[in-house]
Amino acid sequence: MIDRLYQKTILKHAANACAHGVLEDADHSVTVHNPMCGDRIKVYIKLKNGTLTDFSHEAKACALCQASASVLGEHYHGLTEKKLNDLLEKITSSLENAEGPDNNDWPENKWQDMDVFNVVREHKSRRTCVTLPFDALLQAIKEAD
């Protein structure tokens, strides 16, 4: 199970840690915690007219959460609350859909990087590890408006 969950691509995303660190001039930040596993992530954001212009994160979390935050850090540009809600719905559907990655319907091609997390489908308790960075970002955007 561990080898399948923590495959090389996921570990590479986690090690990449794209957008990791403190965003000093952030408009808002929020910390969220997953009580199921102990993952904790703090996100920092800058918004302009409701659109995300800058993002960073600090994660004290498992490799799944760190990898997911890194993918988010690569592709966050231009997200709005609506786009993020739609994306989070697609991610959740992807993690719950037993029919495989052929059914993933990403709103933009850049989010196909999230296909690497398809292995989490078999581990319901680990799905929140993948969605936590996106949930934190959504909470930050809602609070900042």
Image (spheres, rainbow, N blue to C red):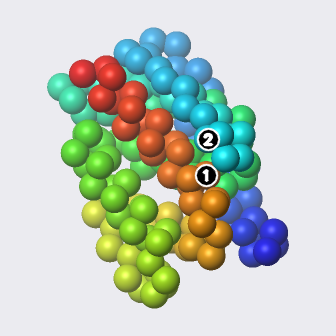
Q: Considering depth in this image, is 37 or 89 the residue closer to the camera?
A: 37
**Residue carrying label 1:** 129
Q: Position of residue 35 (x, y in %)?
A: 65, 40
Q: Outermost residue, top direction?
A: 25
Q: Hey, which quadrant is residue 122 in on the image?
A: bottom right
- Relative to 3, is 121 on the left or the right? left
Q: Is residue 100 above or below residue 92?
A: below
Q: Position of residue 46 (x, y in %)?
A: 36, 23
Q: Is residue 142 above or below residue 61?
A: above
Q: Residues within 10 Å of mark 1 (few under 14, many from 20)?
A: many
Q: Is residue 125 above or below residue 97?
A: above
**Residue carrying label 2:** 34
Give the residue displayed 57% in from the left and 73% down from the top: 121
Amino acid identity at mark 1: Cys
Give the quarter of the figure containing the N terminus.
bottom right
* Mark in front: 2 vs 1: 2
Give the residue displayed 72% in from the left and 52% down from the top: 63
Amino acid identity at mark 2: Asn
Do the residues bearing badges 2 and 1 touch, measured as CB atoms within 8 Å?
yes
Q: Hey, which quadrant is residue 106 in on the image?
A: bottom left
